[in-house]
């Protein structure tokens, strides 16, 4: 197929490609992220127009739709900090954890700090041990931004998935993953700082 015919096919299917790409993206993804992913979808259309031969019996629209969706998914995977194998293992772990009862009670950090210092009666056959780093963790959690703190609490205290957290904080799964990673790096850095424990 000559260059003019390819260009004509691309122009004729631009709206179609944008629609297919939009349907492949989470509706909460907005702004430049969304436009960038749609642009990747249009790039998939360009590839489809150049490679389509039509001798296999499939219509161009069906072939182009697959290429557009595939290109959007490739762009999303490139943003994911986990490899495909790690992501699969993470999802399997989520499925297992969803079947387990949640062993927590939602409680504020201030109340937990109070309980950590309170002289609560413990069963006589169990020795109660409080990790001395807990107070420091609670202090540094308060220093995170509100969205970082919320993501950490929803992830580790509530056990929600990235998708569920994203719905609550209006971020995509990859956005939640990035916020959580940033928060954990801050906490690790704060906890690894040398401290004067003589007090």
Image (cartoon, rainbow, N blue to C red):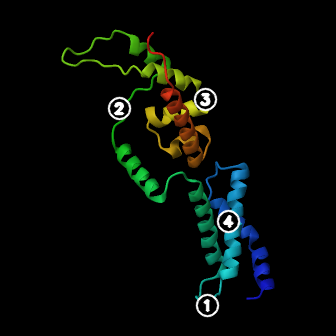
* Few, some or many residues within 10 Å of mark 1 (<14, 14–19, 20+): few
Question: Quick one: label 3 or label 1, which is nearer the N terminus?
Answer: 1
| Tag 4 secondary structure | helix
Number of marks in picture:
4
Give the mark, 3 or 2, whose residue is nearer the N terminus.
Answer: 2
Above or below for 2 versus 197: below
Circle 3/circle 4 CB separation < 8 Å: no
Can you tell which mark lies on residue 146? 3
**Foreground: disc 3 or disc 1:** 3
Residue 158 visible in the snapshot: no
Whole-number angstrom distance, CA of label 3 to CA of label 4: 34 Å
Residue at horizontal 62 percent and vertical 60 percent from the top: 75
Lower sequence index among marks 1 and 2 = 1
Which mark is on residue 55?
A: 1
Q: Position of residue 67 (x, y in %)?
A: 62, 72
Q: Quadrant of residue 131?
A: top left
Residue 131 vertical placement versus 83 (above, below): above
Q: Quadrant of the N terminus?
A: bottom right
N-terminal-most mark, 4 or 2? 4
Q: Position of residue 100 (x, y in %)?
A: 33, 41
**Secondary element type, mark 3:** helix
- Give SS at disc 2: loop
At x 65% / y 75%, what residue is drawn? 64
As helix, strand or loop, the secondary structure at mark 1 comes to loop
Q: Position of residue 62 (x, y in %)?
A: 62, 76
In the picture of the structure, the residue carrying the numbered disc 2 is 103
What residue is at 69 percent from the left and 49 percent from the top?
A: 30
Distance from disc 3 to disc 1, alpha carbons, whole Å, reads 57 Å
Asked whether, in this view, residue 26 is left or right of residue 12, the answer is left
The answer to whether any part of residue 166 appears in the image is yes
Residue that mark 4 sits on = 41
Looking at the image, do the residues carrying marks 1 and 4 touch, with CB atoms under 8 Å apart? no
């Amino acid at each position: 197929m000559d260059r003019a015919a390819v260009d004509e096919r691309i122009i004729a299917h631009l709206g179609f490609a944008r629609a297919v790409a939009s349907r492949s993206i989470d509706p909460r993804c907005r702004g430049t992220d969304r436009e960038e992913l749609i642009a990747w979808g249009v790039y998939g259309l360009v590839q489809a127009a150049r490679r389509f031969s039509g001798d296999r019996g499939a219509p161009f629209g069906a072939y182009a739709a697959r290429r557009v969706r595939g290109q959007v998914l490739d762009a999303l995977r490139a943003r994911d900090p986990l490899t495909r194998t790690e992501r699969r293992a993470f999802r399997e772990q989520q499925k297992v954890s969803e079947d387990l009862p949640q062993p927590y009670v939602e409680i504020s950090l201030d109340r937990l700090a109070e309980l950590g210092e309170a002289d609560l009666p413990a069963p006589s056959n169990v020795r109660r041990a409080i990790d001395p780093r807990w107070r420091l963790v609670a202090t540094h959690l308060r220093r995170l931004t509100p969205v970082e703190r919320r993501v950490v609490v929803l992830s580790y205290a509530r056990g929600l998935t990235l998708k569920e957290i994203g719905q609550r904080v209006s971020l995509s799964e990859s956005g939640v993953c990035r916020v959580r990673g940033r928060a954990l790096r801050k906490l690790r850095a704060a906890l690894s700082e040398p401290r004067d424990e003589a007090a």
